[in-house]
Amino acid sequence: MAAQFGRRLRKGAATTAAAALAVAALSASQAPGVTNGDPGRQANAGASTAASEEAGATGNSPYYTDLPPLNSPNPSASPTASSSSIGTAVSRGAAEAGIPATVLDAYKKAEAELRDSKPGCNLPWQLLAAIGKVESGQARGGDVDAEGNTLHRILGPELDGNGFALIQDTDGGKYDGNSRYDQAVGPMQFIPSTWAWAGRDGNGDGVKDPNNVYDAALAAGHYLCRNGWDLSVQADMNSAILSYNNSQDYLDLVLSWYEFYRKGTHSVPDGTGTVPSHRSDDGSGSGSGGSSDGSGGSTSPSPSTPSTPGTATPKPEGPTPGTPSTSPTVPPTATDTVDHLADAGTAKLTAMAGDAFTKRISTRAETKADRIVAKVRVRFTIVGDTDTTFTGGESTATVVTDSRGVAVAPALQAGEKTGDFTVRASVVGRTVKGVDYAATVTARAADALARTADTALTCTPGGEFADQVQVKATYQGAVAGKVAATATLIKSADDPSTNDKGPYFKDADGKAVRTLTDLQTDADGLLTLPKLYADDTTGTFLLRVTTTGGAALTVELTVAAADASPSPSPTASASASESASPSASPSASATS
């Protein structure tokens, strides 16, 4: 397999100078607002400054730099036939437009999910395809199984600071197998520290795995849709792409592939997609979509080739040797003037599990003299052992302070995990005193219980009750689902201790039990108790059902002997005797 990938990586490496120049022009024409300067760091003129301040999904790891063909794709009825004669621009266009079936399905399903969960984002699946092409060559030409799992690990280089960013291990090697440094992982090349909060379960198997194309595509979609970006707006799309990998060349390249895929694409069998052959690190290491065995090095290093126009070649940062440094003359930004953050009147943050928090966090940016500072980016981060998120499922949110210097965080949505956690407010791009907000998720509760039927609950000694007890829980008049409950057969209304005789439930072994714990109402607030049985004791007994939140209901149970022959009343007996005597005499007389 490694040899096969080596042949793929070398395929189509040669291009004519004229074609390269034309493609470079195409790339430039498809990146509106591009400015001159360092291609690795220059921000797009129309993009939000957020992009330059975010760490990036990939840790700014290397990526494939192959540009799309000159000709727009024109898929034929037989993609295999059209791609079998690679050499002309037209046939290569059709080949490049083919996306492996499982990978394509993952992109489209991610778009559909985001259409429902974040409709204001307007995520096009072609943008995911463009990023997937640049990051991993569409999961190495579709080297995935039917469930979307990569058959071979796709890893970026060690981010050890040696020509790359320095990111020490954050996942204990769970995803990248490296316990010293992080590496970008999977088809969409997430670094583990980003995956920790951005990861999603796209295939519904209960696991968030960056090596699964469904999970990775959905995570990438949510990542691109954060910060309230609307990807139908070019400036927002630019900001989102730059936040994925902070490079102007990267932005230009992704936009080029995005336009290429928008003009047409088709599905090809998994494992038959084309794989790019040029990377932004010039082959010096295993970049995004590098070694399939996860070794961090190329499987078959190719001789270095001169850079072609349009190929992303990072420029050295800092002043050019021999050029005298000059002091900056630009005035300080609003962020530079911030001394600290202060609470802006946030109320107590408490919500029941599964509910939205009714209060939102408000934070104010201030100078050392306590003057307000507008247009400052404040990042809110949820920390602690909790599954609470901001609206939309994110654990971080960045908001710009308004004219009053106040940033209001998105609403919090409580998960199912109860307990305390913290929301931390900090200034993006500056280390100053922030604010920690304590928040609490309480257990789901009910304040009222009622039986769903009014039939009397009776039984004979040693028998079983014909009807099961069913109750409905509500909270402030609304259905109270998933609320914990307990059912106990008590001694009396004044003595709630467990009765040792009378009706009982049965455990799994058939033994009598008179207290049931770990009960829970269903989504409709209903709780149906197990069947009740009676011992030989007769009388009236009480069953008490209680829930979290203080709701309680006492149900009366009756155990009485069966009345086989009801005794007639004295009046009825006398009447029957009198009516029987006259008729008996004539009969006897007739017989004699």
Image (spheres, helix red, strand yellow):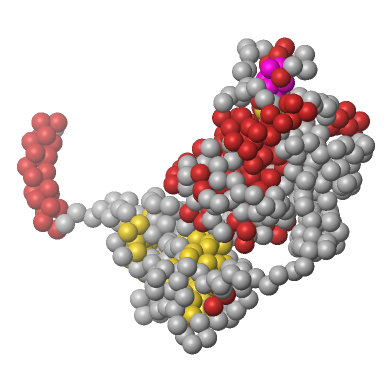
Q: Quadrant of the C terminus?
A: top left
Q: Which residue is drawn at 29% across and 61% down?
A: 477
Q: In which quarter of the image is residue 463?
A: bottom left
Q: Where is residue 529 in the image (x, y as percent from the top left)?
A: 45, 56
Segment colored magenta? 90-96
Q: Where is residue 107 in the image (x, y as percent from the top left)?
A: 60, 36
Q: Position of residue 253 (x, y in %)?
A: 67, 39
Instruction: Using the image as rendered, state which of residue 590 and residue 12 is in the foreground.
Output: 12
Residue 581 higher or lower than 383, as above or below: above
Q: Can residue 496 be seen in this view?
A: no
Q: Does the magenta stretch include residue 18?
A: no
| Residue 155 left/right relative to 212 | right
Q: Can residue 232 be seen in this view?
A: yes
Q: Quadrant of the N terminus?
A: top right
Q: Where is residue 73 in the image (x, y as percent from the top left)?
A: 63, 22
The chief SS type of the magenta part is helix
Q: Residue at x 55, y 81 (%)?
A: 339
Q: Which residue is drawn at 29% across and 51% down?
A: 565
Q: Which residue is drawn at 79% across and 41% down?
A: 279
Q: Is residue 91 magenta?
A: yes
